[in-house]
Image (cartoon, rainbow, N blue to C red):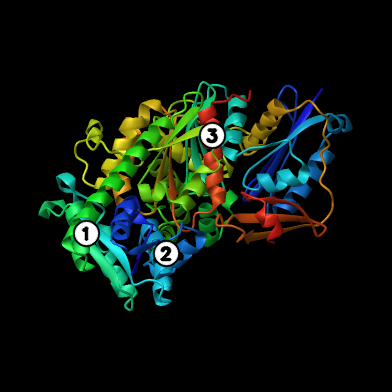
Amino acid sequence: MRYYVGIDIGSISTKGVVIDENNNIVASDYIWTNASPIDASKRLINSLIKKSKKEWLENIYAIGTTGSARKLIGKIIGATSIKNEITAHAVGTISKYPDVSTIIEIGGQDSKIIIIKNSVVIDYAMNTLCAAGTGAFLSSQAKRLGIEVEQMQNYYEKSNNPAKIAARCTVFAESDMIHKAQIGYKKEDLIAGLCNAIVENYTNNFIRGRRIEDKIVFQGGVSRNNGVVESFKSKLNKDIHVDKDSHLLGALGIALIAKSESRGERISLNIKDIEYRIREKECKGCSNNCEVVYIYEDEELLDTIGNRCENCKSNI
Amino acid sequence: MKIGIPNALFIRDKIIMYSKFLNYNNIDTVISSDTSLKTIEDGVELATSEDCIASKIFLGHVNELVNLYRNNYLDAILVPRVYKQKNNIEGCVKALALYDILNNIFRDVKFIDVNVDYSKNITYFKSLINLGITLGINSKNRFLGAFYALQEQNKFEKNRYMKQFENINFKKKNVLVIGNEYIVNDKYIKRLVISSLNNVNIIFACINNKVNRYKNISDQVYFANSINIMNGVEEYIDFADACIFITGFPCATDSLVNEMIKERINGIPYIEIMVDENTSSTGIVTRMESFSDIIEGRRYI
């Protein structure tokens, strides 16, 4: 039996799966990135190794990375496939829901909609200049209310009179919330208002003019918040599916992409326990002014990311 | 005499006309270099925060020329204004204020303005004649220079138009890139957005000589830039497998066009990429890579 590994390194969390030939997840983990993608990947890979049988590890035929740190981690661990998270999420979801038409994805710093027809992505939209209405927005508001983001859904269920909160901008939402609290709204109503605001923001930004057809799958960290799920259901007046592994679908997607691109050679899953040093610099080597990420392995330049020419290597 | 011309905003498109007119009359021209990160940084420093990215880039270009002026390398900087184009079509109103804004920011610099206003019968030809009067060029040379400059400009536009058509490649997927000329053809922005699109053929359709095809989409279009974009869409959409609309943030005229275009191109993959001075390549790369996947339409399972 052949096995494949998918790693999704996001801004907030890092996810990984090991799948078998039949696309079943045989090992998985979900950890916080803590602003250190290399450390998170080390922890994740070690955890996947611990959770896997020796036979699985000896028969890995491809490794894929996705997420915002896909290129960095992909280079370090020698990934065979490196793909953007939009495609990876779509592939992961299609594998579980072949009849999916709409994917709503709200992650830590971005939110997106992916429209699928006959198992092929035909349209998508992603937040551009602002992260209002994403997971980061929810966590900052939860912090302000003195609760954990995970507890939000308990409060949502208790609310009878959700406060109206504008989610166009995190700062204005905060002003709205303070004002509503001052005029006597209960905590649960404020939280329900926040969940509704996320949905309102999302529909205003992404659904405009798009036909939202069944089946709708909601994923990303925010899909764990039942308040937002319920709010989506009532806003769209449609059923919303949240997979039990919704947080792993990006990792599953990239594992499947890696499987389809596999060259049929065995590959080992490991990340050396050495210090990788990352340095980001705007290269002045030519007028491209690329934002180059230099990766050093024990002080030796291992690779660069983001460069369009080789000038950056002589211009460190 | 040496005159600087900023290679940005609406001036970009008529740069051949202005430089040929001046060169014909033995006036050297210095055109600001392609936009770089430094151009944008300089522009952001000079602009108010609410200015659009295109005007910030413009100020960066002018700043480069101002430095030359202050080092006595230039005698003046040309800043033309276009009030109304043919058929009384108006350009972006922000651009009308640029001459005054520049005079206010760089008080020690000599700027030469020249107006185009078809509602007052000041055509491009007439505006060049007026520019000649300002520069003290005699009437014969003014006339011959303007005639020559317009001829060269027309030649350039015709060539560009033909090249765009020749560029269509039926063996590859054609991606239509639309937007204002000064955004789409700006080297910095072009590189930022387009460089991660692989294995496709790019058609830039920002300028169009046929001025009324936009009416197929809507006959109620107010701004000249919107008309240009819509003409581009109408001209090439039947050859395109996907469409990218690059828009500068914040652009009021583009926000009107976007929705209409979406309806017109219904059916093919479409994406709007909004760029501002804070846009880093990371976010754009993710969007363009996934857009490439959509164009490719590949199934992985």
Q: Are marks 1 and 2 in contact (CB under 8 Å)?
A: no
Cα distance between the residues tagged 3 and 2:
32 Å
Q: Residue at x 57, y 41 (%)?
A: A220
Q: Amino acid at mark 1?
A: Asn
Q: Chain of mark 3?
A: B
Residue A237 percent across, percent down from the top left = 40, 32
Tag nearer the camera, 3 or 1? 1
Question: Counting residues from the N terminus, which is met first, the one under dot 3 or under dot 1?
Answer: 1
Tell me the SS state at disc 1: helix
Regarding residue B126, the answer to whether it shows in the image is yes
Residue B60, labelled with which disc?
A: 2
Q: Is residue B91 above or below residue A45?
A: below
Q: Which residue is mark 3?
A: B292
Residue B71, placed above or below residue B164: below
Q: Which quadrant of the view contains residue B95?
A: bottom left
Question: Do callouts 3 and 1 mark residues in contact (Cβ within 8 Å)?
Answer: no
Give a yes or no on whether discs 3 and 1 share a subunit.
yes
Q: Quadrant of residue A82?
A: top right
Residue at the image position 36 percent from the left and 62 percent from the top: B29
Q: Where does the N terminus of chain A fall, quadrant-wise? A: top right
SS assignment at label 2 = helix
Which numbered dot is residue B141? 1
Please state the horizontal and vertical placement of residue B112, each as a whole percent of the image. Answer: 26, 67
Residues at marks 3 and 2 on the same chain: yes
Task: Please state, as top left, top right, bottom left or bottom right, where the C terminus of chain A lies in the image.
Answer: bottom right
Q: Residues within 10 Å of mark 2 (few under 14, many from 20)?
A: many
